[in-house]
């Protein structure tokens, strides 16, 4: 049975569900993702074996993307190739565990790559070196050659999942606002890219200010705010066709801060009328609108719980910006933020357990997380200006906007683990702001 | 009036910028610039001109941190704006509300809307027809000063009354 591969086809457009996904095994090789500082797990990923003529380059590229994904988590430490004793030249040959033990590689990832026309096939296995066993069973991915990065991300997601017991997040995309030009004349365009910055694609031009794009639950549509008409209004854009339409365009009102409901059928957003900003829910198909809050204070930045039953939002009804939770149909709201300072832009974790937010206190900005009852607040970052968190599909990493100070200030995307470790810039050409992470593709 | 001299120069500079890039704010539908005039400013010597409104009447009011209540000076400026608009009925106005960068994006949009609305409400209370005044908020998206210090933030926490000739008459 061990030679029998489960096969997953990766089409360019098709979002194929995992077939025959291997059950996670209980083995000694395991990273428990906890809040404490952990020692990264040493692993080796020798270049995948090129099994056909002309697949050398893509084999190396795939191995490098897998390594970049794993290394980027901060949970894994790659043992460089020049330290390897063994090399893998035949994917189907038995593994020399002793050679990998000798360099303290706790996990070993081996793979084979074959190319036929524009068809690409990637096979891989993960080994628990010290147990001397395979971790899970081998998997085979098939798809087109131009989808090689996605295949590499899928391999890395599978490795991550087998070793951590958590879902992965590498085969995902980020929609954000690309920024160019000086602070006094910033040009903004909607853009989408792979989570690691590859495959950048622009979705709008820079003629109108665009703000805060948000992915739909399936990642096929994007909500955003545009000044296309001269007044901020919420638009919905189809990522595939790049067709867009205005959702809410009532004269004399502004609409902004939209987010999809978890079923993708409706939008919760802020509407400003006569200087007062409240929350509304709108059915995307019918345009029917339901008012959710009715106060003279500012209510904005709403975000649904994953089950769609509740909405977390910010309000200054107490005098300063604070976080509140209410039922998805409105009604009484419960305040959950009580620390010093101002709290805004709450976002419910896809796991449902935490709420990420922006906090301002004493002239500094922080990205933080708290439980949904407001307890166990933890600040993950501190800078002149951090804001607008978004969750990775597995709820383990947060991406956000960091803007630097002064006339030369620039906006960039950063990510940080929910534990507060592994803070780093996201590789983007040019400046960026307002990221929104897609689900796993 | 001394404090307004600098403001008038700024407005002139930004207005020129807007002319070279008419589509900067999208669509070109209304030509509303963040600080532009949306039309030929004319000479400030002509008391019915947009330039006069900007320089002599004063087209903007400034706000305290996280506030949308007009200061006494701000109130007087808006009262002058109201008088001018009542006399010069050929113009319509868009009041643009802005915030400094020390706030989250969404909140600043809502705060800018409050500021713009505070100006509109006072204009309307003085008899300016409400259909002649629209409001819009740019939040922190269009700073005029970029130094990340209070001296700049104070200039950015503003509501600017931008006029256009009412072509529909």
Image (cartoon, rainbow, N blue to C red):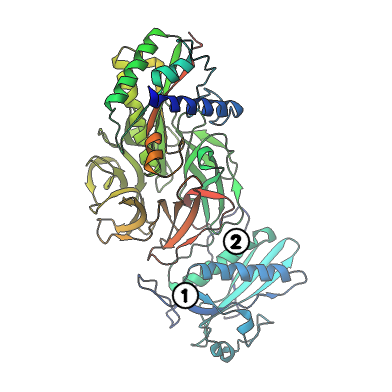
Chain under numbered label 1: A
Relative to A405, A61 lies left or right:
right
Question: Is the residue A232 above or below the residue A46 in the image?
Answer: above
Residue A403 in the image, given as x and y percentages of width and height: 46, 50
SS at circle 2: helix
Chain under numbered label 2: A
Labels 1 and 2 positioned on one and the same chain: yes
Relative to A199, A286 lies left or right:
left
Query: Observer-nearest residue: A403 or A394?
Result: A403
What numbered label is drawn on residue A150? 2
Using the rendered image of the protein, determine whether residue A311 is visible from the camera's viewpoint.
yes
Among the 4 quarters of the image, the one containing residue B99: top left
**Residue most extreme to the right:** A53
Residue A432 in the image, given as x and y percentages of width and height: 52, 49
Q: Within 10 angstroms of label 1, few (less than 14), some, or many (20 or more) residues?
A: many
Residue A82 in the image, given as x and y percentages of width and height: 64, 82
Q: How many dots with numbers?
A: 2
The residue located at (56%, 31%) in the rendering is B24
Query: Looking at the figure, which quarter contains the N terminus of chain A?
Result: bottom right
Residue placed under numbered mark 1 in the picture: A163
N-terminal label among 1 and 2 = 2
Question: Is the residue A246 above or below the residue A31 in the image?
Answer: above
Question: Is the residue A51 above or below the residue A200 in the image?
Answer: below
Question: Is the residue B72 above or below the residue A74 in the image?
Answer: above
The residue located at (26%, 62%) in the rendering is A376
SS at circle 1: helix
Residue A321 in the image, given as x and y percentages of width and height: 28, 44
Query: Observer-nearest residue: A8 or A34?
Result: A34
**Residue most extreme to the front:** B2
> Alpha-carbon distance for marks 1 and 2?
20 Å
């Amino acid at each position: 049975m061990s030679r029998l591969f489960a096969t997953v086809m990766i089409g360019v457009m098709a979002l194929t569900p995992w077939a025959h996904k291997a059950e996670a095994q209980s083995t000694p090789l395991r990273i428990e993702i906890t809040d404490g500082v952990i020692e990264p797990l040493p692993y080796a990923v020798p270049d995948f074996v090129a099994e056909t003529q002309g697949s050398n380059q893509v084999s190396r590229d795939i191995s490098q993307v897998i390594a970049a994904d794993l290394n980027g988590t901060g949970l894994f430490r790659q043992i460089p190739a020049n330290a390897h004793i063994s090399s893998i030249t035949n994917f189907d040959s038995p593994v020399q565990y002793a050679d990998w033990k000798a360099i303290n590689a706790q996990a070993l990832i081996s793979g084979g790559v074959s190319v036929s026309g524009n068809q690409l096939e990637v096979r891989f296995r993960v080994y628990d070196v010290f147990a001397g066993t395979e971790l899970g069973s081998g998997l085979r991915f098939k798809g087109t050659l131009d989808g090689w990065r996605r295949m590499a991300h899928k391999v890395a997601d599978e490795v991550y999942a087998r070793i951590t017991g958590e879902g992965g997040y590498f085969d995902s995309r980020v929609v954000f606002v690309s920024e160019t030009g000086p602070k006094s004349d910033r040009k903004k365009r909607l853009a989408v890219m792979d989570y690691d910055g590859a495959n950048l694609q622009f979705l709008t031009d820079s003629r109108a200010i665009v703000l805060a794009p948000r992915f739909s639950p399936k990642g096929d549509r994007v909500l955003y705010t545009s000044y296309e008409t001269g007044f901020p209004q919420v638009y919905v854009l189809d990522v595939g066709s790049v067709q867009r339409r205005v959702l809410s365009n009532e004269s004399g009102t502004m609409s902004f801060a939209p987010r999809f409901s978890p079923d993708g059928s409706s939008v919760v957003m802020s509407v400003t009328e006569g200087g007062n900003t409240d929350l509304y829910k709108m059915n995307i198909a019918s345009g029917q609108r339901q008012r959710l809050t009715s106060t003279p204070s500012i209510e904005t930045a709403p975000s649904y719980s994953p089950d769609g039953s509740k909405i977390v939002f910010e309000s200054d009804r107490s005098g300063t910006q604070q976080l509140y939770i209410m039922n998805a149909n409105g009604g009484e709201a419960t305040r959950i933020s009580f620390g010093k300072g101002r709290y805004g832009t709450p976002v419910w974790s896809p796991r449902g357990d935490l709420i990420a937010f922006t906090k301002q206190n004493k002239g500094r900005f922080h990205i933080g997380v708290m439980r949904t009852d407001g307890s166990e607040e933890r600040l993950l970052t501190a800078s002149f200006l951090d804001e607008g968190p978004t969750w990775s599909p597995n709820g383990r990493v947060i991406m956000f906007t960091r803007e630097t100070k002064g006339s030369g200030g620039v906006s960039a995307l950063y990510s940080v683990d929910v534990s507060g470790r592994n803070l780093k810039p996201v590789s983007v050409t040019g400046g960026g702001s307002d990221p929104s992470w897609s689900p796993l593709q | 009036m001394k404090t307004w001299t600098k403001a008038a120069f700024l407005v002139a500079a930004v207005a020129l910028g807007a002319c070279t890039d008419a589509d900067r704010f999208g669509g070109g539908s209304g030509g509303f610039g963040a600080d532009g005039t949306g039309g030929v400013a004319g000479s400030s010597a002509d008391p019915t001109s947009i330039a006069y409104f900007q320089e002599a009447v004063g087209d903007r009011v400034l706000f305290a941190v996280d506030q949308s209540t007009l200061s006494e000076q701000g109130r007087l400026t808006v009262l002058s704006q109201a008088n001018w608009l009542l006399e010069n009925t050929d113009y319509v106005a868009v009041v643009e509300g802005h915030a400094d960068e020390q706030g989250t994006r969404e909140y600043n949009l809502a705060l800018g809307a409050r500021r713009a609305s505070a100006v509109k409400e006072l204009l309307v209370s003085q008899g300016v027809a409400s259909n002649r005044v629209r409001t819009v908020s740019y939040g922190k998206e269009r700073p005029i000063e970029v130094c990340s210090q209070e001296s700049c933030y104070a200039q950015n926490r503003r509501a600017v009354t931008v006029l256009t000739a009412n072509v529909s008459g």
